[in-house]
Image: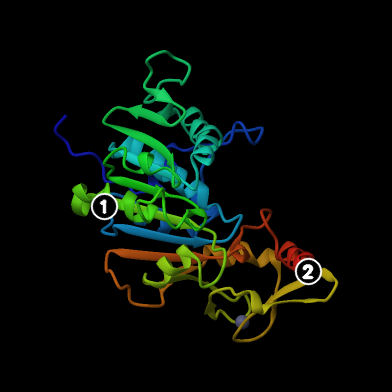
């Protein structure tokens, strides 16, 4: 009984306990970090044993960022129980997040199912916006609600889609500052996860947060020459009007890289900091949709969407 709990990291917890999608897909399957290898370091920075207090994740669509956040929530509920505040842009979106993301997470993962009573049970401590579990509570709220953001002190803050937060919440100032003030009493043990797809350059919150971080980028090896590089849109080339011809061109040897090379490139990748953080306790990760695993969002689709957006 007196043995300290094992110091699992979030990715290890997910590999051991997380079951995915009996709702979405036909067959429930265990989480595998190898599918999205770039999420490992992001998740592990969220682990209680990691010194980072703020983890910034600027990401494109279809890279699995939401699941990284869900794994963190599951890890907290099961492994480091404490008060958690999860903030969506609005209270309405928080309700939707609860129904579409949190409930499946709790129902599909046996280790969590036994810790949180079903919502239907009377006095279960489980409502749409509040989930009690042994040793803690998960509260969901919207960045448009000053009352919600002030409702509790929280050791962990999950600040999702922050580019859609209002600049000022009901005359009380910046919602992120308001939420982070609620975690201060937890000192070095607190942790905030700031996630968003960037919106407008120069006005983006996540871009500003990332710029103040150590600006990690995921470097992957060229399948032809081995040069490590991070993927950028300018190096994706295709014949105009023919997205199927889209190939990525290595910045060192300029050889075309095919979609099917991506899996091995992601597996061989590594995060590298490209700046020094203003705050040493902040780590920042940036990954675009060019990194989406094969079968999720292809380079052909990137080209197709780009063409469709012209004009
Ligand atoms: Zn190359």
Instruction: Residue lying at the far top in this picture: please name it.
Output: 122
- In the picture, measured across the screen, residue 103 lies left or right of residue 186, that is right
Q: Disc 2 or 1, which lies upstream in sequence?
A: 1
Which structural element holds mark 2? helix
Q: Which mark is residue 307?
A: 2
- Local packing at callout 1 (Cα closer than 10 Å; few below 14, some 14-19, many 20+) is few
In this view, the residue in front, 143 or 54, is 143
Which structural element holds mark 1? loop
Mark 2 to mark 1: distance in Å? 45 Å
Q: Ligand 1 closer than 8 Å to the CB at disc 1?
A: no
Q: Residue at image x 53%, y 65%?
A: 287
Q: Which mark is residue 129?
A: none
Give x and y (percent) for residue 149: 36, 43
- Local packing at callout 2 (Cα closer than 10 Å; few below 14, some 14-19, many 20+) is some
Tell me if residue 247 comes above or below residue 8 in the rendering.
Answer: below
Q: Quadrant of the C terminus?
A: bottom right
Q: Quadrant of the N terminus?
A: top left
In this view, the residue in front, 226 or 136, is 136
Q: Residue at image x 34%, y 27%?
A: 132
Give x and y (percent) for residue 183: 26, 48
Q: Quadrant of ligand 1?
A: bottom right
Q: Residue at image x 57%, y 56%?
A: 63
Q: Which residue is mark 1?
A: 49
Residue 271 quadrant? bottom left
């Amino acid at each position: 009984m007196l043995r300290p709990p094992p110091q699992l990291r979030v990715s290890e917890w997910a590999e051991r306990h997380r079951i995915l999608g009996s709702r979405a897909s036909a067959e429930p399957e265990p989480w595998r970090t190898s599918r999205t290898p770039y999420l490992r370091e992001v998740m592990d920075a969220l682990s209680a044993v990691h010194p980072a207090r703020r983890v910034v994740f600027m990401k494109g669509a279809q890279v699995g960022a939401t699941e990284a956040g869900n794994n963190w929530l599951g890890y907290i509920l099961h492994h480091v129980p404490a008060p958690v505040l999860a903030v969506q842009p609005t209270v309405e979106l928080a309700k939707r997040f609860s129904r579409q993301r949190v409930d499946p997470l709790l129902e599909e993962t046996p280790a969590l199912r036994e810790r949180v009573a079903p919502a239907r049970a009377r006095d279960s401590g489980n409502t749409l916006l509040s989930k009690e579990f042994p040793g803690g509570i998960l509260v969901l709220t919207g960045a448009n609600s000053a009352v919600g953001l002030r409702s509790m002190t929280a050791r962990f803050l999950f600040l999702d889609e922050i580019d859609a937060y209002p600049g000022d919440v009901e005359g009380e100032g910046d919602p992120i500052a308001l939420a982070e003030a609620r975690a201060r009493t937890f000192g070095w043990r607190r942790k905030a996860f700031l996630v968003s797809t960037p919106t407008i350059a120069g006005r983006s919150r996540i871009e500003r947060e990332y710029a103040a971080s150590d600006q990690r980028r995921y470097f992957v090896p060229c399948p032809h020459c081995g040069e490590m590089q991070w993927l950028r849109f300018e190096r994706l080339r295709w014949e105009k009007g023919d997205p199927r011809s889209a190939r990525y061109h290595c910045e060192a040897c300029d050889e075309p890289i095919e979609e099917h090379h991506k899996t091995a490139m992601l597996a061989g990748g590594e995060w590298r900091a490209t700046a020094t953080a203003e705050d040493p306790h902040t780590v920042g990760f940036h990954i675009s949709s060019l990194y989406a695993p094969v079968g999720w969002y292809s380079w052909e689709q990137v080209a197709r969407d780009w063409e469709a957006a012209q004009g």
